[in-house]
Image (cartoon, rainbow, N blue to C red):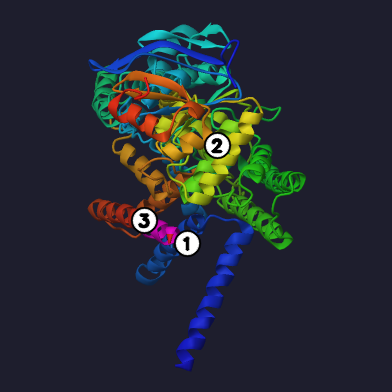
Amino acid sequence: MNDTNSSKNANDKQESVISRFIAATEIDPRLLGMLGALALIWFGFHFYGVIFNNFGAFLTPRNLWNLSVQTSSIGIMATGMVLVIVTRNIDLSVGSMIGVIAMAMGLLQVEYLPQFVGLGHWSIWIIAVILGLIIGTVIGALHGWLIAYREIPAFIVTLGGLMVWRGMAFLSGGGRTISPVDPTFALLGGGPYGAVGANVSWFIGVLACIGVAYILYSGRQSRIKHNFHLRPMWAEAMLAVVGWATIIGAVLLVNSYPWPKGIVRQYGAKIGQDLEGTFISHGFAIPVLILAAVGIGMTILMTRTRFGRYVFAIGGNPEAASLAGINTKWVTMKVFALMGMLTAIASVIASARLNSATNALGILDELYVIAAAVIGGTSLAGGVGKIYGAILGALVMQSLQSGMVLIGFDSAIQRIVVGMVLVLAVYLDIVYNKRVKK
Amino acid sequence: MTNTGTPLVNLKDISISFGGIKAVDQVSVDLYSGEVVGLLGHNGAGKSTLIKCLSGAYNADSGEVFISGEKVIINNPRDARDQNIETIYQTLALADNLDAASNLFLGRELITKSGFLDESRMEAETRKIMARLNPNFKKFDVPVSALSGGQRQSVAIARAVYFDAKILIMDEPTAALGPQETEMVAELIQELKKQGIGIFLIEHDIHNVMKLCDRASVMKNGKLVGTERVEDVTEDDILSMIILGKNPKK
């Protein structure tokens, strides 16, 4: 009797330490949950490898660097999908849009632009990227117009888009694979040359550390100014230290992955030096930096601007939003146009990484993107969603996939696992929400 | 007390129909500043529909709206706000997933010089006005879905009061409230009257009408039965106007 009481008390006390910690730092418990899941996946795959294959391949700089590159394209689209789902819509067409935009950019680079500016001209990749972004935005805006102003359900419009744009990709390229793309364009997809190297990575890392400090400092100043509740100093310090440690850890990680010997030799020959045996770091891959920039930009858009506020308001109560004078149709159309633009960015990365545009590029991506957003805590009922959640969700999905590839599961099993994880993640989210409401 | 001069609001011959049914049929009502006009009638009598033509949620098929004697066109909620018309809807019209400050400033967010949302100033302003309207209100950092009916109501009222409304439309403001909160709303209405705000009050509770209103306009089946000064009639007179569609004394 006494025993059960005391153990119950101890349990209570322990719980209150955790909840006090969460309250003081104001960290979203879901974020902790997702990081926990990620840690479980990473260590799980690593030690599975250690035990059964005598080699843990997961927690190596090489694998984690590749993982970061593989996450970029889905992660970028997932940030846009958050807005789409928050406004109670869905976009099933992003995978096909990747295909058609990549095909358009590929054809521009390989067939059309060289006719006007000359083969290998420096402006080719810039024109191709800009036109790709315009095409993506226009396609998204068209979807948005049909959904908002013609009141066709988003599911139907984008299901149609899924078929139309895949067909267009095939037609425009005549079923061919367009390759190779412009060499500068190819850098946007990552690879040894498409990474920024050790020094620039450190520079970015330091900037990011200053950014973290500034955000914490200005947040505190603004709370002091308005006499709001302040986080305890230890919580502020801890957030800063954790933030800095994450950033510095990431820099150390990408800098400890060296260029392969062949690339070093090739590069040495190009600049006329003997670099045999030199350690040249990859540093951050360019697509990862694009993802980071998109993530920061989208977070600011969603949390600090009127547009973001309206997106949430429409998701929470469309009638209230409209009565508050918000032009809900225009906002919805802009959400889809933005989704189209982000899809175009993802398309640049995906085709640059492959160094070609193919008909099959992006097939099934829409489902991975939706899954990433949902695993990241975006509610399909609308009104709730976080940008960082979607990026973490994309990382979880990609970690599962590449982990299973590393330990040699075949693709059928991969799909089974990913499918089950999606359902499980949403179930856990529902359970968590019910407990919070109690 | 009699009303002279130009009314603050004059709705003239307003008609609107939905699918062939005349929801509002040639109704005219007016409102002076510092006055509360009750709109009464059964469910479906057309009170809310009429008032939505003023708040911009519906567009009348015919009829005219005059604000302080000048004809205005109100096509949407934004036009209504530009005329300092604020509405508290029966459904409260709050975005449940947003907190009190976000709801209060929805559609009219305060922004910083660099064009971003000024969250802390909005929260500070919200704390100020809530301290005046409902001093017990403490839940500033949770979505309004986590609030009680009374707390949600005070957010909805704060939204209307904060922006210096000249004309306030309240659609059953006490429907979801307990006695204490109802009393709070009643006091608030008295205070707003003193500031010269004109209030249209849609209300089912006849006691509240007698207590709060200066005049009562009764509607039935989309038509105006009549407008009476509250001091000239009894509760029974009003009830028979609502039920029978005529004033027994006339």
Q: Secondary structure at mark 2?
A: helix
Q: How many marks?
A: 3
In three-dimensional space, the C-alpha distance between marks 3 and 2, rounded to whole angstroms, equals: 33 Å
Is residue A49 one of those drawn in magenta? no
* Residue with the mark numbered 1: A36
* Residue with the mark numbered 2: B157
Q: Mark 3 or mark 1, which has the lower sequence index?
A: 1
Subunit bearing disc 1:
A
In the image shown, does B35 or A346 lie closer to the viewer?
B35
- Dot 2, crowdedness within 10 Å: few (<14), some or many (≥20)? many
Q: Amino acid at mark 2?
A: Ile
Q: Say which mark, if any, is on residue A224.
A: none
Q: Which residues are magenta?
A: A431-437
* Residue with the mark numbered 3: A430
- Dot 3, crowdedness within 10 Å: few (<14), some or many (≥20)? some
Any part of residue A285 in sight: no
